[in-house]
Image (cartoon, rainbow, N blue to C red):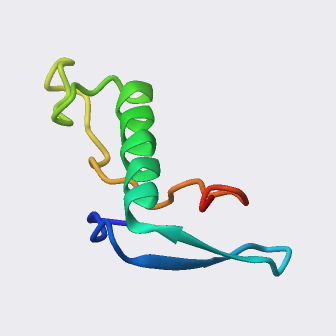
């Protein structure tokens, strides 16, 4: 997920057990922001995604490809 969704839309999520849930764009954006903050914290990046380590370290990127969703988020 490389961007935020409009807050007013509903996104249909199908889970591996076959259940389907609609999640608002606002809630999905919150989950994305939480996942991005966790990713940055685990990789020692600042709030803007910049590494504050020595230049010899390589940064694999500042992008979150997967956002955790779970049943019950839509309600």
Tell me which corner region of the image, top left, top right, bottom left or bottom right, holds residue 52.
Answer: top left
Vertical position of residue 64 compared to residue 3: above or below: above
Provide residue 43's location: percent of width, then percent of height: 38, 29
In depth, the one of 4 and 40 nearer the eye is 4
In depth, the one of 61 and 65 nearer the eye is 65
Quadrant (top left, top right, bottom left, bottom right) of the C terminus: bottom right
Q: How many marks?
A: 0
Tell me which corner region of the image, top left, top right, bottom left or bottom right, holds residue 5.
Answer: bottom left
Image-based side of 54 in relation to 10, left or right: left
Image-based side of 59 in relation to 36, left or right: left
Provide residue 62's location: percent of width, then percent of height: 27, 47
Quadrant (top left, top right, bottom left, bottom right) of the N terminus: bottom left
Seen at 27% across and 27% down, the residue is 45
Provide residue 32's location: percent of width, then percent of height: 41, 52
Vertical position of residue 12 compared to residue 49: above or below: below
Vertical position of residue 4 compared to residue 9: above or below: above
Vertical position of residue 59 compared to residue 7: above or below: above
In depth, the one of 69 and 65 nearer the eye is 69
Provide residue 23's location: percent of width, then percent of height: 54, 68
In depth, the one of 50 and 55 nearer the eye is 50
Seen at 37% across and 56% down, the residue is 29
């Amino acid at each position: 997920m490389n961007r935020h969704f409009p807050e007013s839309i509903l996104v249909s999520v199908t889970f591996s057990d076959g259940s389907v849930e609609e999640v608002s764009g606002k809630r999905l954006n919150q989950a994305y922001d939480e996942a991005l903050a966790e990713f940055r914290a685990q990789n020692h990046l600042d709030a803007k995604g910049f590494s504050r380590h020595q230049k010899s370290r390589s940064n694999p990127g500042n992008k979150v490809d997967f956002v955790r969703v779970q049943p019950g988020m839509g309600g």
